[in-house]
Image (cartoon, rainbow, N blue to C red):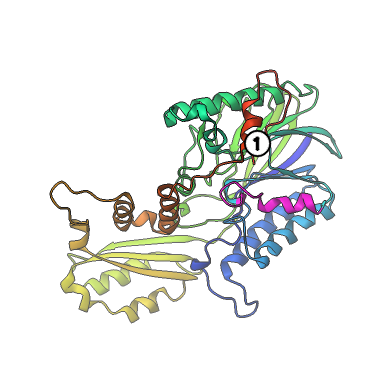
Amino acid sequence: MIKILHLSDIHIGSGFSHGKTNPQTGQNTRLEDFVTTLTTCIDRAIGSDVDLVLFGGDAFPDATPPPFVQEAFASQFRRLADAKIPTVLLVGNHDQHSLGQGGASLCIYRTLGVPGFIVGDSLETHRIETKNGSIQVITLPWLTRSTLLTRPETEKLSLSEINHLLIDRLSTVLEGEIRKLNPQVPTVLLGHLMVDNAEYGAERFLAVGKGFTIPLSLLTKPQFDYVALGHVHRHQNLNPGNNPPVVYPGSIERVDFSEEKEEKGYVLVEVEPGKCHWQFCPIPVRKFCTIRVDVSEAAEPQAKLVKAIKKHRIKDAIVRLIYQLQPQQIDQIDNTVLHDCLNEAHNYRIQPELVSQLMSPRLPELGAGGGIDPLSALKTYLENREDLQDIAEEMLAAANSLLAGEEEFFAEDEAEKIKSAEPNSQDQLQLF
């Protein structure tokens, strides 16, 4: 029996706008939050004497994090190397540099030759020796449509047809890896991807236009004893029959308000050929709290706001107060009082909304036969979707990239490797 700790989507360095500077350390408190949760995971791996750690991708918000963020990440994973615990670092979409070209942020661990560390940046089978025996790990990093979009034969195909073509080719290459497996050795598929029946959050918007959805049937192969996934921030098991378990552990810390109600943690797995037992282990993370109040019909809007705030436990939480009021009520609100009421929160934002604006969304004026350009339409949409404010900038950036024709493309020689893959091919599929 081999014991595994499976975690994913650390995103260390995210959410600085929700934190503040710690005067004792000079660091942003949200960085310290992420380090604390990561430390909890590593403590458990070492304390439970696991045989293997699997990281499902997305170490940072992007592939070029500041040095102090890289150091915070490396200092924790270094502990696994010191404890002689083999570790697989899978490349996720946020780990890829320059939209999939130019390597990945995690490749430095392979370059430095960190003992026991494997960087999964290609579809490949790794046989790993642990203190309790061998295990086979197939790494499946983040895939993009551009893997096939460089091929001339796709030029006249619809996006749906291209997706089917890419899934067929992926199935072919994955089958080639499966045929190499030793059935006497436990096998784990480690993938950073979107599965068709997963419940998505903000990560679906952040990956818009860059990935494609993989059918669950491609992952539920009898040769796999456990399928360890990354990318989706909400913990879930996509195959309740557990044959095999197909598990997203979710992110280890809340990234924004879209994850306000999600439990965070990691997964402990015990696996042997044909058998698997797994358990989700929640960890304490900083609370996010949204307070919504409609004072547009209140005779005393200030009093109603104060009462609403006092109903919530906001101490050390990240809070947003969203309230609706009429234009004539603006002078009745004393912001000093609101700031005093929210003072015990770790960080807070006050967001008033005029009822007249809510009832008549601001749309660009159109002339006869006119229209709205896509970027303006998206901006207008986001201005009227409060639940998407935390990822609005990322969505606009993704839209700009798509409209500018900057969809990532791989080098031609990589495309030719994929093109040459046949059902019986034993060649590895290089994805980046």
Query: Splitting the image into 4 quarters, where does residue 357 fall?
Result: bottom left
Query: Which residue appears at 18% of the width and 70% of the height?
Result: 327
Left or right of 310, for residue 69: right
Q: Residue furthest top?
A: 424
Give the residue drawn at x 62%, y 73%. Answer: 27
Q: Which residue lies most toward the left here?
A: 368
* Up-down relation of residue 295 to residue 371 (above or below): below
The magenta stretch spans which residues?
95-112
Tell me if 323 is positioned left or right of 56 in this view.
Answer: left
Depth order, front residue of 159/271: 159
- According to the picture, the residue beneath numbered tag 1 turns out to be 413
Left or right, residue 240 beside residue 184: left
Going by the numbered disc 1, the residue's amino acid type is: Asp
Q: Is residue 2 above or below residue 406?
A: above
Front residue of 398 and 340: 398
Residue 125's image quarter?
Answer: top right
Residue 289, compared with residue 373, is above or below; it is: below
Q: Nearer the viewer, residue 107 or 345?
A: 107
Residue 366, percent from left and from top: 17, 53
Q: Quadrant of residue 134?
A: top right
User: Of 69 and 358, which appears nearest the observer?
Assistant: 69
Residue 215 visible in rendering: no
Residue 276, placed above or below residue 323: above
Local packing at callout 1 (Cα closer than 10 Å; few below 14, some 14-19, many 20+) is few
Classify the position of the C terminus by image quarter. Answer: top right
Magenta span has 132? no
Quadrant (top left/top right/bottom left/bottom right) for the N terminus: top right
Q: Position of residue 274 (x, y in %)?
A: 72, 23
Q: How far across and down, in percent of the image, does residue 35 sit?
A: 65, 62
